[in-house]
Image (tube, rainbow, N blue to C red):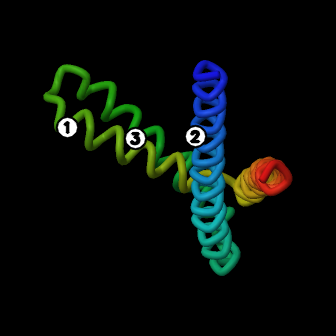
Amino acid sequence: MAVFGLGQKAAKDQSEADHKRLCDINEDCSRDIARLQELADVFKAFPGWEAFRKQYLEAIRIPKLYGAAAKALAADDKVRNQLAGQIAEAEFLAQALPIIEEKVRRLTLKQKSVQEKMMLQDSHKTGSE
């Protein structure tokens, strides 16, 4: 009987851990969706964004950053990290609006799937009580 009780406790602990993981994923998705939606709103409010993105970020800024990073390979970690951050920022800003909107769509689908799993867990929890 004690072994059976231990199995139930382990199953309950695993279920709680799974639920917490789903809650964390749900929160992460919400945060990412909000951040991307804010970025998309900024891009939409800036009428010349596409031209700026293509003519400056993609054609000038990112290639210059890659060139600086290539020269800085022998430099110290601080310089490499600063350049890596600038490159990541420029690449992030260089994303086209449709790419951002697609990411929001995929994150929303992922979040809905997670929420469905959470609701299913809740319904099993209430059904077994």
Query: Can you identify the residue that label 2 sits on?
Result: 17
Identify the residue shown where x is 18% and y is 20%.
Answer: 74
Q: Earlier in the sequence, mark 1 or mark 2?
A: 2
- Front residue of this view, candidates 123 and 98: 123
Asked if residue 87 is positioned above or below residue 39 in the image, the reply reads: above
Q: Give how far across and how far down residue 26 sits, in percent.
A: 65, 55
Q: Is residue 17 left or right of residue 102?
A: left
Asked if residue 38 is positioned above or below residue 45 in the image, the reply reads: above
Q: Nearer the viewer, mark 3 or mark 1?
A: 1
Q: Earlier in the sequence, mark 2 or mark 3?
A: 2
Q: Considering the numbered disc 3 on the image, is that residue within a helix, a strand or a loop?
A: helix
Q: Amino acid at mark 3?
A: Lys
Q: Quadrant of residue 76?
A: top left
Q: Give neighbour class at mark 3: few <14, some 14-19, many 20+ (Cα, 10 Å).
A: some
For residue 64, which numbered disc appears in the image?
3
- Front residue of this view, candidates 88 and 108: 108
* Residue 54 appears in the rendering: no
Query: Can you identify the residue that label 1 sits on?
Result: 79
